[in-house]
Image (tube, helix red, strand yellow):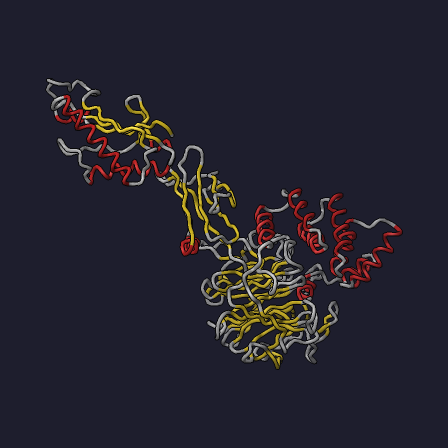
């Protein structure tokens, strides 16, 4: 496949001297002759034990020719006896198990090695395994392009009314690339027919001629620029680093006709560029040393065509122990291809929604049709002129014309299974400080827990589940209130479009000790003289009681109303009871239940706080100290 063909470029190109230092099996392996390598390693093994590095090469060789059971046994053997196996080879081992039909063994291994893999990888795997039990609601029509050849054809890209792509079909101006036995890659162009098929492919003449690799184009229509990759050269010849590697550089052709390298490193290969007009980010795949496995996705920020930042890794939510390539952004989602072990086959297309804060949701395998049991990569898509969507993807699935072919697909809906995803922070409603270790749950209509997580040290959280038409989000922590909101229909779509911040009230912020009782902390309020009507100023404070009970739904309170000593004792008793009843009626009207209010009682002047009793002269402010309402907490 051409993905393998591309990866070959970034591996070591040994000099003759370097190869002489290796065994025959090593030389075959590094020359990409995997069947010969297997035979040679087996002969060498009969004479003396192979080193762990050679055993891993042998496992890789089995993997390359599709003998997954043999590959898995070797990977697992080395893994059990040696710690040198990389996470990239762990991925190959798990791929071998999965493609050999041992998916349960993969799941068991992931759990046993949870310390080796990132939490993001484990979450991604579990999520996608869960999705595979669901049938995608999409009808995909996919056909092989007329323009395909008997050689490798891949990396489709839109260009005006044409399709650009890469191919290893022979040309007089191109030499044969020895490891693949095919021509050095070049960029071709084909014109769209009305049906969306592409025919009459010819070499693309608008890019400068180049006798080595030229591949994976992207055309930025807004700036009329071409981004693509070429072999590193010096003075017209291939350039190698100190280890004998020839890597791929990322180049740009400006609308003025000027050519320049944007990213070039003799030890690093760049490929599959994608330029996002809105953010001015240039995305690409590369094999930097900080990768999470094989090749990872990165971006650099640009300004008027100039690179302004160092390459930024998209992180472990996107990148895996496998290889990630071919980024493409459409309708707020990032599409890319990966050969991570939990896919349907080799390399699959995944979709990740770009969140409001610029982060990414869990990458979701877009399912059968676009993806197959073989390698599927280089996905692009756009709206169809008639209806629905049209796009192109490369694949080495059976029935093609060559090793890799480009396929056209049509579909009525955006591809991929939908998910429900929210991300935000948990904060204290009073202090606005973040709350760590808060429990966040997603619940079904029936109240079943769909997923449960805890907020991080900075209060942040991100939670995602396969699509539901109804979701209830709840959150709580010991000593804090309960948050609960339910979403369905349009609301479930809207809530995902912005940060989802959860406010929890701290219980200690709502109460105080007063008159040897635990009471709700609200401002003092007064009724009009001799009246029991709830005025707007009184309602402001009563609404705080409503907020407290809303935050703590099991809260039970007792309403205590007190007057001063002015007026007769019996009158004050009746007045305070009327006020307590009026408060209860107001609170019930605001949504509190009868179970929240266990009693509403007026005490009149029975519990005077100071010396202002009957017949005693007191200033008004001293009498006001006795006129009060307490909301006594009986049960929390």
Quadrant into which the C terminus falls: top left
> Observer-nearest residue: 494 or 318?
494
Q: Residue furthest right?
A: 47
Q: How many marks?
A: 0
Q: Quadrant of residue 415?
A: bottom right
Question: 80 and 605: which one is in front?
Answer: 605
Between 388 and 39, which is closer to the camera in this rendering? 388
Residue 270 vs residue 481: left or right? right
x%, y% of residue 459? 45, 42
- Percent coordinates x, y for residue 340 in the rendering: 64, 55
Which image quadrant: the N terminus? Answer: bottom right
Give residue 66's position: percent from left, percent from top: 74, 60
Does residue 562 lie above or below 281 as drawn? above
Q: Residue at x 54, y 80 (%)?
A: 194
Q: What residue lies at 10% left-to-right and 17% top-to-bottom?
A: 615
In the rendered view, would you say 40 is above or below 209? above
Left or right, 205 with respect to 15, comes to left
Q: Give the residue at x 72% y 71%.
A: 177
At 54% from the left and 65% from the top, the residue drawn is 274
Q: Is residue 136 left or right of residue 67?
A: left
Residue 575: image location, x then y, percent: 17, 28
Asked if one can make out residue 476 in the rendered structure from this viewpoint, the answer is yes
Of 4 and 507, nearer the camera is: 507
The answer to whether residue 17 shows anywhere in this view is no
Q: Residue furthest bottom?
A: 200
Instruction: Decide if residue 190 is on the left or right side of residue 564.
Output: right
């Amino acid at each position: 496949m051409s993905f393998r063909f591309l990866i070959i470029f970034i591996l070591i190109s040994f000099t003759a001297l370097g190869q002489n230092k290796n065994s025959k099996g090593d030389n075959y392996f590094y020359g990409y002759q995997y069947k010969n390598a297997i035979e040679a390693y087996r002969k060498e093994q009969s004479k003396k034990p192979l080193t762990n590095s050679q055993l891993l090469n042998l496992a890789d060789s089995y993997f390359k020719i599709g003998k997954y059971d043999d590959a898995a046994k070797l990977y697992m053997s080395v893994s059990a006896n040696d710690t040198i196996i990389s996470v990239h080879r762990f991925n190959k081992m798990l791929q071998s198990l999965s493609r050999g039909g041992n998916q349960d063994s993969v799941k068991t291994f992931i759990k046993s090695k949870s310390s080796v893999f990132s939490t993001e990888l484990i979450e991604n795997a579990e999520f996608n395994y869960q999705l595979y039990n669901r049938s995608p609601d999409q009808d995909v029509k996919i056909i092989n392009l007329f323009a395909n050849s008997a050689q490798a054809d891949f990396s489709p890209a839109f260009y005006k009314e044409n399709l650009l792509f890469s191919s290893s079909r022979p040309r007089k101006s191109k030499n044969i690339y020895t490891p693949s036995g095919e021509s050095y890659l070049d960029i071709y162009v084909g014109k769209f027919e009305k049906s969306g098929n592409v025919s009459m492919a010819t070499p693309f003449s608008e890019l400068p001629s180049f006798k080595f690799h030229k591949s994976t184009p992207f055309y930025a229509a807004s700036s009329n620029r071409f981004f693509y990759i070429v072999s590193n050269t010096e003075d017209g010849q291939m350039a190698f680093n100190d280890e004998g590697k020839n890597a791929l550089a990322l180049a740009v052709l400006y609308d003025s006709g000027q050519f320049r390298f944007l990213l070039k490193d003799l030890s690093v290969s760049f490929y599959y560029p994608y330029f996002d007009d809105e953010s001015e980010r240039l995305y690409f795949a590369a094999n930097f040393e900080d990768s999470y496995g094989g090749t990872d996705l990165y971006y650099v920020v640009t300004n008027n065509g100039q690179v302004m930042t160092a390459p930024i890794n998209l992180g472990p939510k996107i990148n895996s122990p496998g290889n990630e390539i071919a980024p493409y952004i459409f309708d707020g989602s990032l599409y890319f291809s990966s050969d991570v072990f939990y896919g349907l086959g080799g390399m699959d297309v995944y979709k990740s929604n770009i969140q409001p804060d610029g982060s990414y949701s869990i990458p979701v395998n877009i399912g059968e049709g676009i993806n197959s049991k073989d390698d599927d990569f280089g996905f692009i898509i756009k709206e169809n002129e008639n209806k629905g969507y049209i796009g192109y993807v490369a694949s080495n699935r059976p029935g093609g014309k060559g090793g890799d072919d480009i396929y056209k697909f049509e579909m009525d809906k955006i591809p991929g299974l939908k998910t429900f995803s929210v991300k935000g922070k948990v904060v204290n409603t009073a202090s606005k400080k973040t709350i760590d270790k808060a429990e966040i749950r997603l619940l079904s209509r029936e109240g079943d827990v769909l997923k449960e997580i805890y907020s991080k040290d900075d209060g942040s959280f991100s939670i995602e589940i396969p699509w539901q038409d109804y979701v209830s989000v709840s959150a709580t922590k010991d000593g804090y209130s309960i948050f609960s909101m339910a979403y369905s229909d349009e609301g479930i779509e809207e809530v995902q479009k912005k940060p989802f911040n959860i406010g929890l009230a701290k219980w200690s912020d709502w109460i105080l000790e007063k008159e040897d009782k635990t009471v709700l902390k609200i401002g003092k309020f007064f009724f009009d003289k001799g009246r029991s009507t709830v005025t707007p100023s009184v309602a402001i404070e009563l609404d705080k009681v409503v907020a407290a009970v809303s935050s703590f739904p099991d809260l039970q309170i007792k309403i205590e109303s007190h007057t001063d000593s002015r007026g007769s004792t019996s009158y004050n008793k009746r007045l305070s009871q009327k006020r307590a009843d009026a408060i209860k009626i107001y609170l019930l009207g605001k949504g509190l239940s009868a179970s929240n209010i266990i009693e509403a009682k007026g005490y009149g002047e029975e519990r005077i706080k100071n010396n202002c009793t009957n017949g005693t002269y007191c200033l008004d402010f001293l009498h006001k100290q006795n006129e009060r309402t307490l909301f006594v907490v009986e049960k929390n």
